[in-house]
Image (spheres, coloured by chain):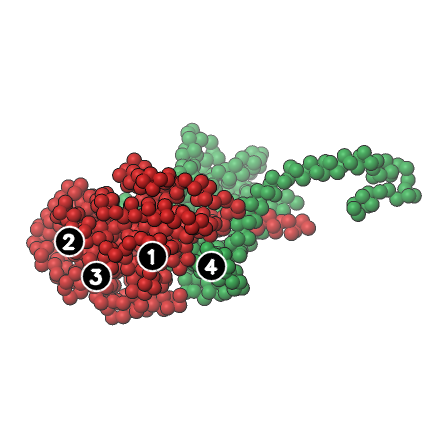
Amino acid sequence: MTVTRVDRPPHKAAPAEVGASGLLPAQRRLRRRSRLTAFAFVAPLIAYLAAFYLYPLYRNLDLSLRDYTVRSFVAGDAPFSGWDNFRKVLDDPTFAPALRHTMVFTFVSIAFQYAIGLALAVFFNRHFRLSTVLRALFLIPWLLPLIVSASTWSWMFNSESGVVNYFLSFFGVDPVGWLTSPDWALPSVIIANIWIGIPFNLVILYSGLQNVPAEVYEAAALDGASAWQVFRRITFPLLRPVSAITVLLGLVYTLKVFDLIWIMTKGGPGDSSSTLATWSYQLGFGTLLPKFGPGAAVGNLLILIALVFGLLYIRVQRRQEA
Amino acid sequence: MISTRRVLLAALTAAGTLASLTACGGGSGSSGSAGASSGTYIFWDPYPQLDASSPWGRLVAGCGTKAGVKVKRTAYDTTDLGNKALLAAQQGNAPDVMLVDNPVVSTLVEAGILTKTSDLGLDTKPIQKNIIGAGTIDGSAYGVPIGANTLALYYNKKVLSAAGVDPASVKDWDSLTAALKKVKASGKKGITFSAINTEEGSFQFLPWFWGAGGDLTRLNSAQGVAALSLWKQWVDEGYAPKDVLQNTQTTSWQEFATGSYAFGENGTWQLGNADKAGFDYGVLSLPARSGGSAPVPTGGEFATVPVQKDTARYDVSKKIVECLTSDANLLSTDTTLMYVAPTAAVQSQQVAKNPRLKPWVDAVAAARGRTSGGLGTKYPTISQPLWTAVQAALSGGKSPKAALDAAQASAQKN
């Protein structure tokens, strides 16, 4: 009840101030009611977050800190094992390659998605005939269910009957084991992922371009700037805020990509295209004997990495608002 | 205050995007559907391809009616069923009767969620020893096999005769490799199988591994290396396509069904498709390294009764299992699923009806359970490194010896 005491006006306060901060009981009741109302509005959101984010997160953390066997998983009496699962995961010979693949997958995907998305956004910004239709067509990768696009890519990359190798054979290129060679499996899933991510970059960067004032371009044209100079000195710098958001959101989305890789290679051949996400699934659900603890530990490490980028995103956003 | 809220928000954003990874968190108070109405019995199986109007669907419903209850059947994907069962048991609403793939039985027994057949009073005597072996842990059986399937070598008669190969000449590894060489020289493709990085890959590799005399507790023995070198040689020489690394048994069958492959390693369950393939085919048992039939792994499902709080339910569950595994029903079920029956009596009826099943019945008689021989839940921790090693060797990432050394090290650690 300290709040009410603070609200009470000091005795020697000037009459004018009493009117401003001193509240009559009726007003106070009203204020409390409005506070309750505000809470009622927030409550569904809090309940939603608790049920669908906090609880699963807590369960996942709990899974990763206990020594779960199938028996103790069912009985619910797994002993607390501290950081054992994490240590086991970090010591595993799969860990280093999985982390490296995750980073390569994420950063190469983002770099190409952003560069191609930006090029297309600038291209479509010139409003030529049919540009709207074409731009809409570019959204298709985004609209297709992932199972469809991943299966299609996997079929196109097939080393025996795939259309990619068939096409390359016209140029005298020997068949490439896109998904069956340890050197090509990761690049192949990255290529597919780039294709899927371009529309997202295109849409956001295109809408960012709409906000660049036309006068700036007119001024540049009057000054005789070349197309490259316009891009280099106007478009790119003015797009920087939008770019930062696009790239950071892309990072968080790409880190957790699982379905595409699982459908195309299942992390194989061997471990050559396994990322932290596929490895976590492999541990938890990919064998006949689930290892929930280590699987959850890998998942938590991934959350931690995503969290770093999440914080970065918030920082960037705050700087932009300021 | 603001910064903690921000951190929390970022955590939530990050967590939300990863929610799919945390899917194994148990739900809060989901009510036990199994105990909701005692007249309804929950039944799970891994046959989503068979709907309620199929003979199997009608059989399940009929067995319920006979036992005086209503059976609610749900079909899951095979790979999904084991984990679904664990989660359901954790929540205390396991199904009353469940059909699971045989290597999963030992995992579920380890979890303590299956009842012994002896406690239920189910008779398992007529069942062939090697078939029930996969569901027998420490001398007790935990389920009744509904049927068995296994692997053999399908061959395309036209491709072989064009290459001048007599299928009868394929007796051991050397003669098989020689046949593959001739087929390749004739411009056709040699052999297709599945070396995918899942349990299917290990299942397909085991006949060669065991056929060389390999032992699952010592993956990197000379015999194991010989088996993996055989596969690697086939892929390297172009006798087998590179995409075996991605092949499931289904896609491997599709390759064989194109008619351009001489051999395909596949299962009993493809017999129905083989008749539709449109070319003359034959079936050989998989050869062992130095002749004779290689031991093949048994496939097929077990009917199990998960542990219930309300033990009074077992009586009806037992009746349902007995009905499903009665001789008459086994015959029709195994005909539908293209399985070999688990009892000698029904097997002879099957062969009488369809003489083409004879080699399969012999193969099943010589087959081994993957989890048999005391391996139990050790098998999954061996199988996963094994398929990883197969992938590493066939893709050229490692030599067979190095790949199996790594596999053995990883299997021992678990």
Asked where in the image residue A269 lies, by quadrant, the reply is bottom left
Q: Residues within 10 Å of mark 2 (few under 14, many from 20)?
A: some
Mark 1 lies on residue: B118
Specify the chain shown as red: B
Task: Give the label, 1 or 2, closer to the camera.
Answer: 1
Mark 4 lies on residue: A72
Label 3 or label 1, whichever comes before in sequence order:
1
Instruction: Tell whether label 4 touches label 3 (CB within 8 Å).
Output: no
C-alpha gap between disc 1 and disc 2:
32 Å
Mark 3 lies on residue: B295
Give me the disc on residue B359.
2
- Where residue B293 appears, as percent x and y from the top left, is 16, 61
Amino acid type at mark 3: Pro
Instruction: Tell me which chain the residue with mark 4 is part of.
Output: A
Amino acid type at mark 1: Ser
- Is residue B87 visible in the rendered image? The answer is no
C-alpha gap between disc 2 and disc 4:
43 Å
Task: Give the label, 3 or 4, closer to the camera.
Answer: 4
Label 1 or label 2, whichever comes before in sequence order:
1
- Residue visible at 86% across and 42% down? A9
Identify which residue, B412 or B233, lies in the foreground. Answer: B412
- Is residue B313 visible in the rendered image? The answer is yes
Amino acid type at mark 4: Ser
Q: Residues within 10 Å of mark 1 (few under 14, many from 20)?
A: few
